[in-house]
Amino acid sequence: MLLRRFFMVWVLGFVLILAIGPLSVAADDPGKNAEQFISGLANQAIEALTKPDTSKQDREKLFRVMLADNFAVKTIGRWVLGRHWKKASDAEKTEYLHLFEELLVVTYVDRFSSYSGESLKIVKSLVNNPKDAVVFSEIARQGTQPVHVDWRVRTSDSVTFKIIDVLVEGVSMGQTQRSEFASVIRQHGGNVEGLLAELRKRVG
């Protein structure tokens, strides 16, 4: 199935965030601030999205808000489209970004109801530059080796963060989707419309 490998990584990565526990944070430490961002999002997700009596419609509304607030959706969407972004018309760009967000919503909205309380531990954080940091974490699975999940986050003020990529066992969400989307476009003669048609099917 087209894009299947990518979505397996996305689903695993995003659902794992639900297990992160609260952390203390030093306001003047960019790395700890990034960890606090991931922790806060986890607590918000658990509170808002995993209640068994939450309807699918309400869960979808809540997830859209969290997605907009915590993920750089447009930045990720433009990057994964790669060189094809410049070739796309304004109308194609607008529809693509809309479908990209819709795809994330329909992929995740039902996943939060199956949260089973796995144990996730933040290992460390690495500040690459004043704007970018990586939060390293491990998910403990009973009877198996921990899964390593890394969160790339970006900030403009050292306080407000957005997730720009998730890596599960070293596999980049963004890079995986970039390769998958490029493959779909090649199969349709290099036309972005071919990708849009596939995305419409996924969210329809």
Image (cartoon, rainbow, N blue to C red):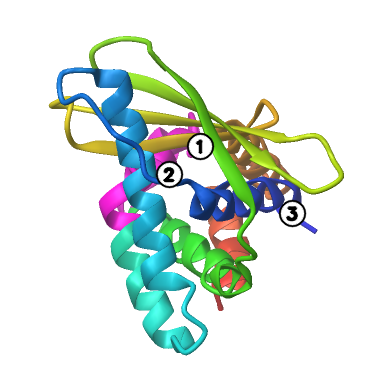
- Residue 154 placement, left or right of 99: left
Quadrant of the snapshot with the N terminus:
bottom right
Q: Amino acid at mark 3?
A: Arg
- Residue 156 placement, left or right of 43: left
Identify the residue shown where x is 23% and y is 18%: 29
Q: How many marks?
A: 3
First in sequence: mark 3 or mark 2?
3
Instruction: Estimate the x, y position of residue 12 in percent, counting from the top left.
Output: 65, 50
As drawn, 107 above or below 192: below
Residue range highlighted in magenta = 67-93
The residue sitting at the right extreme is 143
Could you say whether the residue bearing mark 2 is in a helix, strand or loop? helix
- The answer to whether residue 41 is seen in the rendering is yes
Identify the residue shown where x is 47% and y is 66%: 105
The residue sitting at the top extreme is 129
Q: CA distance from mark 3 to mark 1?
A: 15 Å
Q: Amino acid at mark 1?
A: Val
In the foreground, 82 or 150: 150
Instruction: Estimate the x, y position of residue 172 in percent, counting from the top left.
Output: 61, 31
Could you say whether the residue bearing mark 3 is in a helix, strand or loop? helix
Identify the residue shown where x is 19% and y is 37%: 160
* Residue of label 1: 80
* Residue of label 3: 4
Q: Amino acid at mark 2?
A: Gly
* Residue of label 2: 77
Identify the residue shown where x is 48% and y is 46%: 20
- Residue 196 placement, left or right of 48: right
Instruction: Estimate the x, y position of residue 21 in percent, counting from the top left.
Output: 44, 46
